[in-house]
Image (cartoon, rainbow, N blue to C red):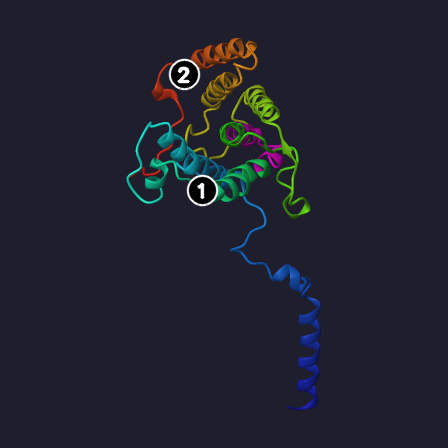
Amino acid sequence: MNKLSYLIFSIALVFAMSSCEKSLTELNIDPNNPTEVALNLMLPEIITQSAFNEGLNPNRVAGIIMQQFVGLDAQQLAYNAYLLPAGTMNNYWNTALYTGVLRSCDVAMKNSADRPFYGSVAKIIMANEFGKATSFFGDMPFTEAFQGTDNLKPTYDTQEFIYAQVQRLLGEAISELGSTSGYNGGDLIFDGDASKWIATAHALAGRYALHTAKRNNADYAAALNHVMAAYNAGFTSNAAAPNFKFDVS
């Protein structure tokens, strides 16, 4: 290669290097490991995990012990004899609840300022998950939850406090969910129908008011008010209730 060829090659190399303005960290991004997920993709995961939680160990254990049904296989056989290993609820608590649906709800709520439908639905689902969980476990983390490695030992709030937060979340969702503003898919239950989610929130508020009614007689009146609000919003039969189908074939 002669000197002229070397010169041309060197000039071309300089231009090629100067045109590359992105750093290695900008280029080395794994498309299969996103740091953010769109809300219309998060909501199906939230709804699915919430529905899946309905059949996990706490519900099975409670149903078998209350003799509402009988276990016929695997660990359910032990539940029939009231034998509950120490780790019976671990998968539900660790994976399905706190690092599962509740964490996803928290992220959706914090990132829905311009798409309030998603934040409101996330509040309804979070309220229901906390309501069920505090019924099972009593005191549990709420105010210091979802901090990750910044707080590995969050304070346990009282069951009374948790129930109050359930009602707060449902009340906020009812007030905020006046329309489907910002909705662009992902609702696997009501397909973006805000009125049906409002009715669901009222029904849940009535349910969890009844959970505390024996401690506070006024909750009976509150429960009745929410039940009537749900009825007036369209909850006139079981067919109107939220129903998730795992198999749509």
Front one among 132 and 139: 139
Quadrant into which the C terminus falls: top left
Q: x and y percent of residue 112 in the render?
A: 59, 34
Q: Which of the 4 quarters of the picture holds residue 51?
A: top left
The amino acid on which the numbered mark 1 sits, given as a three-letter code, is Thr
Front one among 185 and 214: 214
Q: x and y percent of residue 66 in the render?
A: 37, 27
Q: x and y percent of residue 4 in the render?
A: 69, 86
Q: Is residue 151 above or below residue 162?
A: below
- Residue 102 magenta: no
| Start-end of magenta stretch | 108-126
Instruction: Give the structural element (helix, strand or loop) at label 2.
Output: loop
The residue that label 2 is drawn on is 235
The residue that label 1 is drawn on is 88
Give the mark count: 2
The amino acid on which the numbered mark 2 sits, given as a three-letter code, is Phe
- Residue 121 magenta: yes
Between the C-alphas of marks 2 and 1, the distance is 35 Å
Front one among 25 and 248: 248
The main secondary structure of the magenta stretch is helix
Foreground disc of the pair 2, 1: 1
Image-based side of 124 in relation to 59, left or right: right
Front one among 16 and 48: 48
10 Å crowding of disc 2: few (<14), some (14-19), many (20+): many
Q: Is residue 149 above or below residue 29?
A: above
Q: x and y percent of residue 38 in the render?
A: 54, 42
* Picture residue at 71% right of the left edge, 83% below the top: 7
| First of labels 2, 1 by sequence position | 1
Q: Residue lying furthest bottom in this view?
A: 2
Quadrant into which the N terminus falls: bottom right
Q: Which of the 4 quarters of the picture holds residue 33?
A: bottom right
Q: Is residue 219 above or below residue 246?
A: above
